[in-house]
Amino acid sequence: MVKFNAYTSEEIISDLRQHVTATAVHSDVTTLKAHENDQYGVQLASGLPLAYIEATSAADVQGVLQTARRFHIAIVPETTATSTVSGSDAIAGSFVLSLAKMNRIKEINPVDQIAIVEPGVINGDLDKAARAQGLFYAPDPGSKPISSIGGNVSTNAGGMSTVRYGATKDSVLGLTVILADGRELKLGGRSLKQAFGYDLTQLFVGSEGTLGIITEISVRLFPIPLGGAITGQAFFKDMGALADAVAKLRGSGAYPAMLEALDAPTVAALDRYEGTYYAENSGAMLILRLDSYNDLILATTKQILEENGAQNLALTTDATQAAQIMKLRRDMLPAVFANGQHVMEDMAVPLSKLAEMIDYIQQIATQLDLTIYTAGHAGDGNVHPTIVWPADEPEVPATVITALQLMFRKALALGGTISGEHAVGLLKNQWNNEELGPEVDLVQHQIKALFDPMNLLNPQRKIN
């Protein structure tokens, strides 16, 4: 069908170059193909973008928005493109707006215990810079060495320390956001308490780039705890027993900073990957960390774990041994992913329902004859079942889709969510009615229309 376009691609690119740093705009096919899909998503791009823009300033962002409004071009913001839910896969004919070069740590203030950063700053780099001044940045997703603060804020990323320090939202004090119409909003501030006006800061946290473009972030830092940390591991007969032990430890007042669970297939995958023999111990592994402790906390931790079936409990204050234990948790994903094609999911349930959710996942694996590796952040009820199928399968098996649907609905039936920390992206945006209900779904669309009436910002993500 013939389309009578008002403008050519060349005219649109020419207008873009007038409003953005000239070297920031790329329209060659090689570059566009390289930025068509996220690194870890499922490649849901609808086609090549029209341009890839490497913004270096808020003025660049405003320039991109100006051209986008004039020509009604969708904008897909990204930083490191590490989304697992295809949150920044391209839309055909869109502008992919990269904020990766906006990567300055503008301030670390030990007295106020805050940092002010641009969105392209890598999570792990901020933490290292803070630690050099006696502080640390608490949110620690598994992608800590490669994901950006901007992406973490946009998805409200979680991580291993959420059990004690909360998710990304709990560390965000303020944001600078540019709206679709070009206005710049400064939200929140430097103080730890803020109660004036509507909490627009938290509205933008987790909004996945659909309401505005975040150009600056103020985050809370914590002093490094005194006395050193204890890191440990223990083994249980199965994940159900591990979940019961975690629930009791979580409620004990010991305040663990990490409680990570790996089921028997995951431990076996780690053994193959690392050349270890942990799978010989038992059916599930718990990795834990206490950021600070005293004799009572230590004794209570040991007593609760042992009374609830922990075997081969080993705790250490040695930094080298602790790093080896933590490496097991960080290597868990590559160990599992090495077994074929895969999809890793992200459900969270109330702590009291964790054992039931884990048992159900195991039942699904048996019922549908699937290989499912289950691990996750047991301390906050967040599980990551990873379904693996043969590398030579040309399509995702129907049983995999069925398993995901069953697990999603079970998590919702237990009072949980189908996205604990990975966001929604393109992968789950059809589940809004099922999780939120039609009334809340409608309000979400009304909020989107208020901030982005032309639907230019990351359309089809977060809500559909």
Image (tube, rainbow, N blue to C red):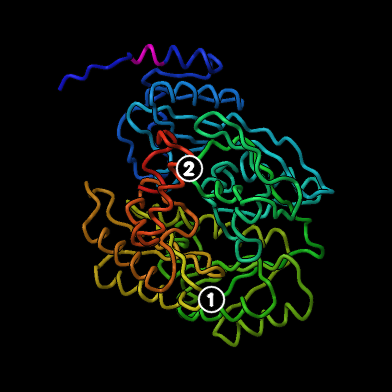
Check the image and report above or below for 37 versus 245. Answer: above
2 vs 1, front mark:
2
Mark nearer the N terminus (2 vs 1)? 2
Magenta range = 8-12
Image check: 135 left or right of 149?
right
In front of the other: 332 or 155: 155
Residue 156 on image: x %, y % = 54, 52
> Alpha carbon of mark 2 to alpha carbon of mark 1: how far?
32 Å
Residue at 66% x, 85% y: name it: 303
- Circle 1 packing at 10 Å, graded few (<14), some (14-19), many (20+), is many
Give the quarter of the image for residue 169.
bottom right
Residue at 75% x, 54% y: name it: 192
Type of amino acid under label 2: Thr
In front of the other: 298 or 217: 217
Q: Which mark is residue 425?
A: none
Name the secondary structure under disc 1.
Answer: strand
Give the quarter of the image for residue 9.
top left
Q: Which residue is mark 1?
A: 235
Residue at 40% x, 58% y: name it: 345
Residue 363 on image: x %, y % = 31, 75
Give the quarter of the image for residue 20.
top right
- Circle 2 packing at 10 Å, graded few (<14), some (14-19), many (20+), is many
Residue 413 on image: x %, y % = 37, 72
Q: Principal SS element in the magenta part?
A: helix
Type of amino acid under label 1: Phe
Residue 24 on image: x %, y % = 53, 19
Q: Which mark is residue 82?
A: 2
